[in-house]
Amino acid sequence: MGSAESPNKPPTKLAALASPAEGPADGKAWQDLWSFKMVLGVWIPILAIGLLHYGVDAEHSWAHNVLRRLYHLPIIFAAFGLGMRGGLLAAAVVSLTYLPHAFLHIGHLAHIDPAGPVEKALEIVLYNLVGAVAGFLADAERRRRAELRKALDEQRSLQRQLVRAGRVAALGEVVAGIAHEIKNPLHALSGTAEIVDPLIAEDAPQRRMWDIHLTELERLERVADRFLSFASPSPLEAQQLDLREVAERLIELVGADARKKEISVVTNLPDGPVRVQGDRDQLAQVALNIALNAIRAIGKQPGTIRVSVEAERPYHGTPMQSLRIENDGPPIPPEELEHLFDPFHTGNEEGTGLGLSISQRIVEQHDGYLEAANAGLGVAFTILLPKS
């Protein structure tokens, strides 16, 4: 991210060889010591220079001077490939390779050696100094790239949030108008239904159609209410609360429904409190909406929902309090995952597509984040909130 390369264009082989390491994990770093790039650029050159150094006649002092300085090249390459660790390791190997030739006079005669002991000792010190300095610079460059990458990712994330917020605000105005247009005649229809309902006997042939009519009126009213909730979120009644209490309340709310469908609810809660500043009811609404979606996603087969709370979970360098709800239902396709929180996006025929969008707005009102990701065989939703 920190280079001039296009984000969609893969780096050239030359850039990959010359650029500093991107900070692999410890185990991978040691494996990379024997990667094709390191063998070709470090270990084979050290071996070749060493063999030439020991094989060239002692009379060719100029050749020995050139060869012992050529050792710097694989050291620098190792430093740029693996950082200070690689530079110091290559310098140590070079020092051990050169040491017998320099002080034990293997391969040449001492009386015609043009280099003195002090010069040879300084050469070995210089190997290690070059390895350390080049490695330090490579590590610094790697850290700088990581910081630039993080800053760029955060900037892009903020840009996406701003664009989405603008669209949602405009959509909210339209939805509010539609909801009010629905509610006005709906009140009249509901009032008429209350008057007509007692006039239709329970055993009348028209009763079944009338019950369907009443059910659809109730559903339409719920849809209108959800539209209004999306357009005009309720103000927060913030207070200090423990995320564990939200998780425990969630388990109470969904426990009966989950047991009925042979879905087990597994919890992982810390011993100490996980404090956040927020609206208890609205956060419970978010968690409940996610859990009910999880139950629907698992379907008719037995499954598991895992509810966990974690304190000070790192998130873009900031410790956040998290509530994670994970299910083992089918994973969400990647193309659908990108639009999961978009208004009116739904995979449920009976849904309005506003539940997750409203949930995300509630979490954002708390200065938090709501994330969804495929985890193993299922899907995990994570609510991240600032520490109180």
Image (spheres, grey):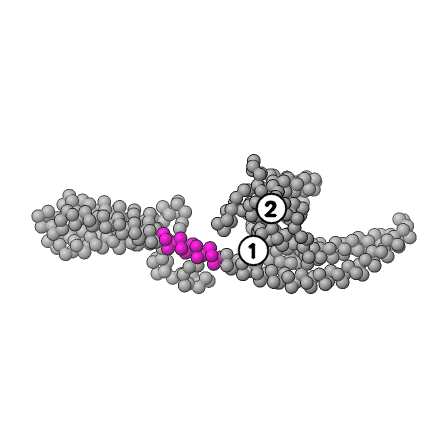
Q: Nearer the viewer, mark 1 or mark 2?
A: 2
Q: What's the residue at 61%, 43% (across, down)?
A: 240
Asked if residue 231 lies left or right of residue 221, the reply is: left
Residue 99 part of the magenta-drawn span:
no
Chain part drawn in magenta: 139-153
State the image coordinates of residue 67 (x, y, percent, origin top left).
19, 54
Q: Amino acid at mark 2?
A: Gln
Asked if residue 120 lies left or right of residue 243, the reply is: left
Residue beneath label 2, please? 277
Label 1 with label 2: CB-CB less than 8 Å: no
Q: What's the residue at 23%, 48% (across, down)?
A: 125
Q: How many marks?
A: 2
Please state which of residues 92 and 164 is positioned toward the viewer in this rendering. Answer: 164
Q: Which quadrant, please, contains the N terminus? A: bottom left
Element class at badge 1: helix
Q: What's the residue at 13%, 54% (across, down)?
A: 61
**Residue 372 in view:** no
The answer to which of marks 1 and 2 sits earlier in the sequence is 2
